[in-house]
């Protein structure tokens, strides 16, 4: 199938996408939570993605544009930053290897993109993970959001 303007979207941060620990009900119960520390990812703030797609459409650009965040973090680091941001104890987070869980298919230990083309052609400037947390939880009122989870 041919697509002149396609977007393939992976998991994003912000706007309806909360880290799994905070969406699992474990926050309310103050349960311990296992988080991978042996995989590296580049979390993408969803508003950055929508702006980039809008720019591609508006400028009628063609080609492949990798859109992702600049921060290279493990899921454990992301969980720690999120816990700090919302005032939950990091002591509930326990680093484990990805082999602890079954994940068909197995992910590479390091995933990410080179975003240089998007930075130049789209003037793309990704939001940091920390800034994305601030925007997400400010918009959704963190204490109220956490009580509903």
Image (spheres, grey):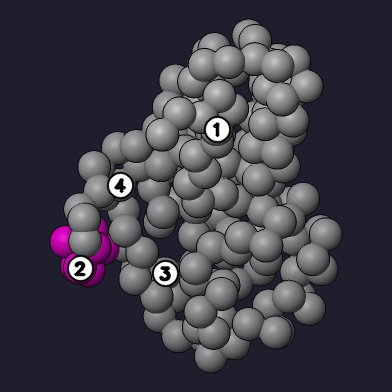
Which one is closest to the eye, mark 4 or mark 2? 2
Q: Residue at x 56, y 74 (%)?
A: 23
Disc nearer the start of the sequence (3/2):
3
Q: Which mark is residue 93?
A: 3
User: Could you tell me how far apart the alpha carbons at marks 4 and 2 are, in whole angstroms?
Assistant: 14 Å
Discs 3/4, front: 4
Q: Secondary structure at mark 1?
A: loop
Q: Secondary structure at mark 3?
A: strand
Question: To which residue does mark 2 refer?
Answer: 102
Q: Nearer the viewer, mark 2 or mark 1?
A: 1
Which residues, given as a range, are shown in magenta? 96-103
Between marks 2 and 1, how big is the CA–CA gap?
A: 31 Å
First reached walking from the N terminus: tag 3 or tag 1: 1
In this rendered view, identify the residue nearer to me: 45 or 10.
10
Observer-side mark, 4 or 1, equals 1
In the picture of the structure, the residue carrying the numbered disc 4 is 39
Tell me: 102 left or right of 19: left
Number of the label disc, if any, that sits on residue 6: 1
Q: Earlier in the sequence, mark 3 or mark 4?
A: 4
Residue 114 disc label: none
Residue 37 visible in the shown view: yes
C-alpha separation, residue under disc 3 versus residue under disc 1: 38 Å
Q: Is residue 126 left or right of residue 41?
A: right
User: Depth-wise, is mark 3 or mark 1 nearer the camera?
Assistant: 1
Q: Earlier in the sequence, mark 2 or mark 1?
A: 1
- Residue at far top of view: 120
Q: Residue 97, image x and y in percent?
A: 22, 59
Few, some or many C-alpha atoms within 10 Å of disc 2 (few <14, some 14-19, many ≥20)?
Answer: few
Q: Is residue 9 magenta?
A: no
């Amino acid at each position: 199938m041919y697509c002149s303007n396609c977007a393939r979207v992976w998991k994003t941060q912000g706007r309806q996408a909360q880290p799994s620990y905070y969406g699992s009900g474990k926050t309310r119960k103050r349960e311990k939570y296992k988080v991978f520390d042996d995989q590296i990812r580049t979390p993408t703030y969803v508003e950055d993605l929508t702006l980039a797609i809008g720019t591609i459409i508006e400028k009628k650009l063609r080609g492949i544009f990798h859109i992702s965040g600049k921060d290279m973090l493990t899921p454990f680091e992301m969980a720690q930053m999120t816990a700090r941001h919302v005032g939950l104890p990091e002591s509930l987070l326990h680093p484990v290897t990805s082999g602890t869980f079954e994940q068909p298919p197995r992910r590479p230990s390091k995933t990410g993109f080179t975003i240089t083309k998007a930075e130049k052609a789209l003037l793309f400037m990704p939001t940091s993970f920390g800034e994305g947390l601030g925007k997400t939880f400010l918009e959704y009122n963190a204490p109220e959001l956490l009580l509903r989870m």
